[in-house]
Image (spheres, rainbow, N blue to C red):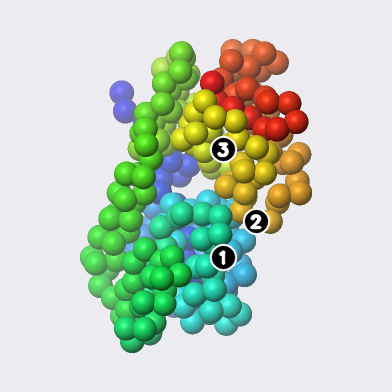
Amino acid sequence: MPAEKTTENLPRILVVDDELAIRRFLHTVLSSEEFTLHEAENGHAGLAAAAAFRPDVILLDLGLPDLDGIEVIKRIREWSLVPIIVLSVREHENDKVSALDAGADDYLTKPFGVGELLARIRAALRRSLLEIPEPVFISNDLRVDLGSRLVTVNEFEISLTPTEYDILRFLVIHAGKVLTHGQILKQVWGMTNLEQPHVLRVNISNLRRKLEKDPSRPQHIITEPGVGYRLK
């Protein structure tokens, strides 16, 4: 029987726009299309949300009150490859080129059609999935389907928080390799929590409690003392 959809496995969209009317419009449209939304009204809030919310796609306005959208793109690209679609009233070619050169994946000029926006989001999600070298990871009783965000142990679905899933996903993509504390913190939380390794330890402990037969003797997520973790 297929797993029931929950808000935890729906694609996550972060909207960064200072116009309340635009955010309300996008919330109405995207919520009806089975996306989980998070909103930010300025650049700094958008950067914080990108690290905490871990979106699958970011919809970004360039004309923000505190930071220019180009700067937001550059800062996100320092630690994340999340697809970024620019939604902007700026229609000059040099604005589009600047955004794309900074690391944006796509550019839509306001006003835009709902159908086109949804098509661009779907395309961005497909491209991000294609970047994953192995969409399904299997190791003994553990199975992680990155395409559907489904994690099972002994064929029973395991419910993970978004942060727990992002840690596991990063470990899966680099299965067999040792990932340092700093690498995981930077990937999952962005640039703001590199000095808080206890946050990582708590989440690893929670993951082991959910995935391991005996969390005190883990068989999947192995600790490399003083360095980090490795997915066996």
Residue 47, image x, y percentages: 58, 64
Q: What residue type is labelled 3?
A: Ile
Measure the alpha-carbon separation of dots 3 and 2: 15 Å
Residue sitting nearer the eye, 29 or 80: 80
Q: Is residue 150 above or below residue 25?
A: above
Residue sitting nearer the eye, 178 or 91: 178
Q: How crowded is mark 1: few (under 14 residues within 10 Å), some or many (20 or more)?
A: some
Q: Which residue is drawn at 32% across and 78% down?
A: 109
Q: Give the residue number, with chain letter if any, for mark 1.
A: 75
Which comes before the other along the chain, label 3 or label 1? 1
Q: Residue at x 41, y 71 (%)?
A: 101
Q: On the picture, is 87 further left or further right than 181?
A: left
Quadrant position of the N terminus in the picture: top left
Q: On the picture, is 65 further left or further right than 13?
A: right
Badge 2 vs badge 1, beta-carbon distance below 8 Å: yes
Measure the alpha-carbon separation of dots 2 and 1: 9 Å
Q: Is residue 113 above or below residue 213?
A: below
Q: Residue at x 41, y 45 (%)?
A: 10
Residue 223, image x, y percentages: 67, 24
Measure the alpha-carbon separation of dots 3 and 1: 21 Å
Q: Give the residue number, with chain letter if any, for mark 2.
A: 191
- SS of the residue under disc 3: helix
For the question of whether residue 107 can be seen, the reply is: yes
Residue 167 bears which disc, if any? Answer: 3
- SS of the residue under disc 2: loop
Which comes before the other along the chain, label 3 or label 2? 3
Q: Which amino acid does label 1 sit on?
A: Arg
Q: Which amino acid does label 2 sit on?
A: Met
Badge 3 vs badge 2, beta-carbon distance below 8 Å: no
- SS of the residue under disc 1: helix
For the question of whether residue 4 can be seen, the reply is: no
